[in-house]
Image (cartoon, rainbow, N blue to C red):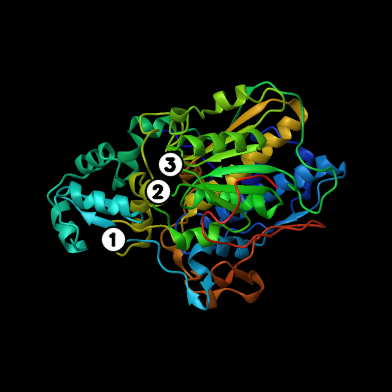
Amino acid sequence: MSLPDRTSFTPRDTIHHIWTGLNLPPATLESLAITDTTEPGLPSSYKVGHLAQASIALSALLASQIYSLRTNNPPPTVSVPYEHACIEFKCERLYTLNGAAAPSAWGPIGGLHATSDGYVRVHDSFLNHREGTKSLLGCIPSATRDDIASKISAWRSVDLECTAVDANLAIAALRTYSQWDVLPHAKAIADFPILLRRIGDAPRRLPGPQNADKCLRGLRVLELSRVIAAPLCGKTLAAHGADVLWVTSPHLPDLPDLDREFGCGKRTIQLDLNNRLDHTALRELLEGADVFIQGYRPGSMAARGLSPEAIAKQRQDRGIICANMSAYGPDGPWSQRRGFDSLVQTCSGLNVSEAEHFGAGEAARPLPCQALDHAGGYFLAAGIMAALYRQATDGGSWQVDVSLAGVMKYLRSLGQYEGKSGFHDAPDYTRTQDVPIEYLEARMTGFGEMTSIRHAASIEGVEIGCEIMPKPLGSDEKRWL
């Protein structure tokens, strides 16, 4: 796998690189007010703080650009403090609900396990993956982590990974860079983290009112997603004023402790797409949507007649933006695989290299946050707003693709701090009490009082923030406001 050398980049350089790669107006970059730093913002050999500030600022700068188009004024100034961005990358771990800390999203059998020739990581946050893993290994339902470890120790790493893929489970073999780089899929991952392409013709348009208190006020976003990356994208658009209708399934397992964080700003409904009436209801909502976000495996929605091309064909009168978040990207032999941030870190060499830099003799060391998820969510939001800009200037329907593997490749291209220097004196923010009070906000939710990390971006003269607080899934009416 060839890797671009971006080791000299500052966060501002990263924003400039992606901005120009999306063919956006260069003059808008003058509205960016951030302080570049080379210091690690979180304890890691990777430039996670750099990625946090750059991805959040990029999404906010796109919102500023859309606001400029609507108001016919210069783009307002965007600022993102480095420390605040790093903390927001850990937001799902740092909120409190009724005074209690956010529970861990990890299950009882997951994590790193030794095999006969190395290691695998088991993702067990969802009950169906947890129980499926036990069944695959021949364990009883009450099996403990030690029982699982004993069974896994008899497997070869890649054999178990492939068998799990065939069983629709979530297990990844631990690889080094050299082992990852020779894989055909590593070579299939794009060098650029946001893929944007025109998929249909339609007149030029910019949804929403010309003058509004928020950058995306009036934009209708239909979101089908779970976990972190795609829900974070919807949360970001909602913070800028979009009407985000979050669709979940009553028959798929959820993660309530994550949903409370990433449901902020959204209305929430439930639809069973195997039910004819619910499928019809989704299509009716899609008719009124300006943006369609989906975070399921490539091809999942297409199998239900909801491919981006099919949707665009029905929207030649006013166009639509179809945004996809996936684990491994739209192309290559792994494109259909289930995947999560922790698994992409594991299989791609990130965890091995992180452990080598830390120097404690570990086989693998995870990043200090779900950096691929978070950056992926902000990149997807940025891609959607770049598509909005292109709709306004060129017309058409547009497809946006972002993957965790694409974010991984970009993060790796930024280089690593030498030796253990990335871990020295870098704050980790493991408790809400570690967070400066000015970065927190307390609001009443459908679950009680929630103290959480407010958004790190600010846009001069424009409001940002959630107006709808988290509530139980399925709490709202199946309609647009």
Q: Is residue 424 above or below residue 346?
A: below
Residue 149 coordinates in the image, percent (x, y): 18, 58
Name the front one of labels 1 and 3: 3
The numbered disc on residue 18 is none
The numbered disc on residue 362 is 1
Q: Is residue 197 left or right of residue 463?
A: left
Crowdedness near tag 1: few (<14), some (14–19) or many (≥20) residues, C-alpha within 10 Å: few
Residue 397 coordinates in the image, percent (x, y): 65, 27
Q: Are marks 1 and 3 in contact (CB under 8 Å)?
A: no
Q: Is residue 400 above or below residue 421?
A: above
Q: Is residue 48 left or right of residue 202?
A: left
Q: Identify the mark nearer the N-term, 2 or 1.
A: 2
Q: Is residue 30 above or below residue 437?
A: above
Residue at 63% of width from left, 29% of height from top? 398
Kind of residue at badge 1:
Glu
Crowdedness near tag 2: few (<14), some (14–19) or many (≥20) residues, C-alpha within 10 Å: few
Kind of residue at badge 3:
Ala
Q: CA distance from mark 3 to mark 2?
A: 19 Å
In what quadrant of the picture does the N terminus appear?
top left
Check disc 3 and report the residue beneath it: 327
- Point out the residue furthest to the front here: 277
Residue at 77% of width from left, 35% of height from top? 206
Check disc 2 and report the residue beneath it: 252
Q: Report the front residue among 250 and 152.
A: 250
Q: CA distance from mark 1 to mark 3?
A: 25 Å
Q: CA distance from mark 2 to mark 1?
A: 35 Å
Q: Is residue 112 visible?
A: yes
The quarter holding residue 315 reads top right
Q: Report the front residue among 284 and 208.
A: 284
Q: Determine whether the residue tagged by mark 1 lies in a helix, strand or loop.
A: loop
Q: Is residue 10 visible?
A: no
Kind of residue at badge 2:
Leu
